Image: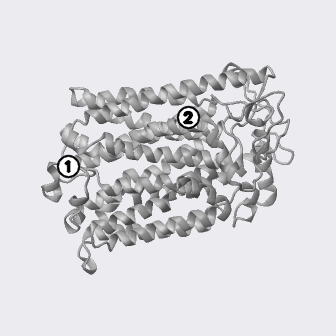
Amino acid sequence: MVNDIEKTSTEHLEIVENSSQTKEGVNIDVDEQYSYEEQRKIIHRVDRRLVVICGAAYCISLMDRTNISVAAITGMMQDLELYIGFRYVGHHAQSSSSDLLICDVQSIMILVFFVTYIIFQPLAAATIRYFGPRIFISAIVMTWGACLIGFAYSPDWQTLTGLRALLGVFESGFFPGTVYLLSTWYSRCQGPVLPLTSRLYAKANDIFVADVDEVHKRYALFYLIGSVATAVSGILAFGFSQMSSLQGFNGWRWIFIMQAILTFVVGILCFIFVVDFPDKGHHTWGFLNESECAFIMRRINKDRGDASSEPFHIRKFLRPALDLKIWGFATIFFCPSTVEYAISYFLPIILRDDLGFGVAASQCLIAPPFVLAGIYMIISAWAGDKYRMRAPILIFNSIITLIGLPMMGFASSTAVRFVGVFLTPAGTNANIPAAMAYQANNIRGQWARAFASATLVGFGGIGGIAESLMFRSQDAPQYVPGIWGAIACQTLLLIVVAMMSTHFQIADQKADRGEKIIEGLEGFRYTI
């Protein structure tokens, strides 16, 4: 697209390593200093240090942004007259607190979070390079904890709404920042790119061939660790709410206080364990030495030639906005994000009001679909990396979601609808890291990655707003407009992926014939 240039042109849009060795057929696992086994040990150390701590912080992030609904059913609604600030007031708004379920009505507070969350993402994504990941991530995590303390002492819903907007500002930098950080440590490909038939032949004849890709599995693990919040946040909130009356605080205030303490602890751990970018990683405590970081830099440069840091310039940062594929990736991410937010917020209501389960059963039955979704997410990521597939994984997962949505929303049999409850989050959640990997494999340049990460996650935040407009409390319990909106999102994903993959295929064919240089780098090929 904008970075694809004709063979006769010498224009380069970013300062990157332009090595003629960066070819699709080069085996980046052949290193001048380390054996393959030693390389894997180094990369697994990066996994343990980087992916785990970032996943833990993401888990806290999800808990902090979604706890408002959990607190509402433990007395906050009555104490702060919260129903005044709700966008829609349904029949449950005037019933007892035991009848109020998560997101029975959509709150203004949920919407204001996403507004500031989206607006400040581009600025925050650029800032992580200036301050460094360790300082930046740990600082913003600590500010989440400070916001939660403010939640606990809020005298009215207006104050709480303002603090939610502030929380959106502080959370805006985390997800795009960590997605960007992860992409700088891992290569697009690993080993020579071979057709599937050649790989099967090598396996049958005991010929060693390394796994082809590695970034999809890391994104999936990061997202899976973060998704633990979906399963445990309700249980933790219930436990914290039992502290009601201690120090004169009601249970909902203790939920915020205790989650704030957890957030502060994770913030301290981030300050200790989060690592810097590869060019400065050897300065990180207890991590890789200078030689090992140099190895990471070598393999990234062999893969895509953009391991070196670049000086910030606003025009360079915003230049990727002219590239249509950046917005295509963002649109792809928007589609599963919209459905995922809807499932997270409305699954308890669907289980109780529409499928007929009791309150306790509805809360408990949230976990099994997301356990299956987590298992399938890892399997999907493994297959995508093993066979270097991105678009086919996205399409297959979207088809699973398209099967699950009408089953969940329109089938007459409770058993069939419950099967749909399992299929829908499985396909949707698996497409979140798949979309991140699709983007990471097909862009190049440090600031292009920073901008692309911001737009990707920003469109995910727009999905949160879209969800609140699609799944309205007045449409309960069937939520027919919301189901159709989710189906439309998945259809849009299929169309955009098909269009982009066709463009990538044509560009790769031209590059193979020597007619085009992709992303300003000889030998670069798109991953489809």
Question: Which numbered dot is residue 110?
Answer: none
Q: Is residue 414 left or right of residue 154?
A: left
Q: Position of residue 340 (x, y in %)?
A: 40, 42
Is residue 2 at least partly visible in the picture?
yes
Q: Which element is circle 2 on?
A: helix
Identified by mark 1, the residue type is Val
> Residue at 73% across / 22% down in the picture?
205
Q: Is residue 62 left or right of residue 295?
A: left
Identified by mark 2, the residue type is Gly
CA–CA distance in space, label 1 to label 2: 40 Å
Q: Position of residue 36 (x, y in %)?
A: 77, 42
Q: Nearer the viewer, mark 1 or mark 2?
A: 2
- Camera-side residue of 120 and 357: 120
> Residue at 55% across / 68% down in the picture?
139
467 relative to 250, above or below = above
Q: Is residue 343 left or right of residue 479?
A: right
Q: Which residue carries the number 2 mark? A: 328
317 relative to 479, above or below = below
So how many labels did they put on this image?
Answer: 2
Q: Position of residue 216 (x, y in %)?
A: 59, 40
Question: Which numbered dot is residue 359?
Answer: 1
> In the picture, residue 518 is in which quadrant?
top right
